Amino acid sequence: MKKNLSVSIHLIENAYKQKFSYLFNCAYLITGSERSAESILMNVICQHPMPEEGEFDEIFSLIKQLSIKSASHEDAALFAFSGDVTGVKLALSEWILTLDEKKARTLVLRYALGLSAKDISHLTGDGIEKVKAILERGKVRASNGAKGSKSAVSLLKAACREVLATSCFPPDFSAILRSIERVIEDKNCRQERSFSVKPVISWLFTGILMILITVIVWMSVVLIDYFREPMQAIKPAFPAYTQSPENTEG
């Protein structure tokens, strides 16, 4: 089992190592909590340990759904861009990072992750009109820097993806894999215990059922034989009529 388990973990690592940071950052941007993001990502990886390359769009959508469901305003209040911003190169990205963090997060949620104004309002606690105003301000700023065929929206998307990539420092992937390994190992142990107990329970249930059937059949035969016999009169302890000694003498 250990050998197969180690192979599985190796395959999981190969499948996710290029996507891990991006997926974690997505979950963090939505939930506002690194702990929640880590829990969601582990849950998704355990459900889909070795996805094909074309399945990552579905995994990304699943992470977004789970993150939106688990997000809270308490976590949103503690949200902070805490990653390495040295990777930021676009001027528009630098401008986004100068904004209030809730406003910057609103732009990234919309233009990097594609969330609706309604979902953003739910995550940040701001009203929809305020969210729309922040998004419009981002468009205006991007329009000022737009050149040639590049639209303001395409510039915003590029800048927000750059900010997303540097939003926080993801946890060590090796530590996540060790946690996943323990989860898988524990799951395998529970399955082995359930497999070893099931035959005993099955045989016990079958034995009890056979005994009950045998008893029912035996009682049925006895009762049938009993009701088939003619009812016999009960013999008296003494004869009904006995001659007296006087009558037998002469």
Image (tube, helix red, strand yellow):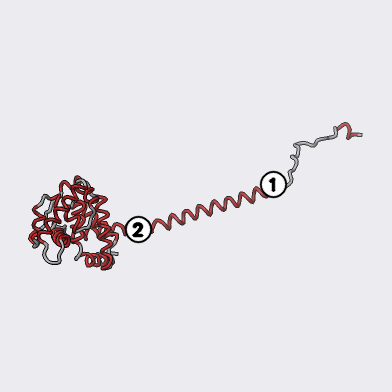
Kind of residue at disc 1: Phe
Give the x, y percent position of residue 64.
25, 56
Tell me if 14 is positioned left or right of 234 in this view: left
Tell me if 2 is positioned left or right of 130 in this view: right
The earlier-in-sequence mark between 1 and 2 is 2
Give the x, y percent position of residue 242.
83, 35
The residue under label 2 is 191
Residue at position x 85%, y 34% from top?
A: 243
User: Which element type, helix, strand or loop, lies under badge 2?
Assistant: helix
Vertically, is 42 above or below 50? Answer: above
User: Which element type, helix, strand or loop, lies under badge 1?
Assistant: helix
The residue under label 1 is 227
Within 10 Å of disc 2 (Cα), the crowding (few <14, some 14-19, many 20+) is: few
Vertically, is 172 above or below 238? Answer: below
- Locate residue 161: give its quadrant: bottom left
How far is disc 1 from disc 2 in space, using C-alphas? Answer: 54 Å
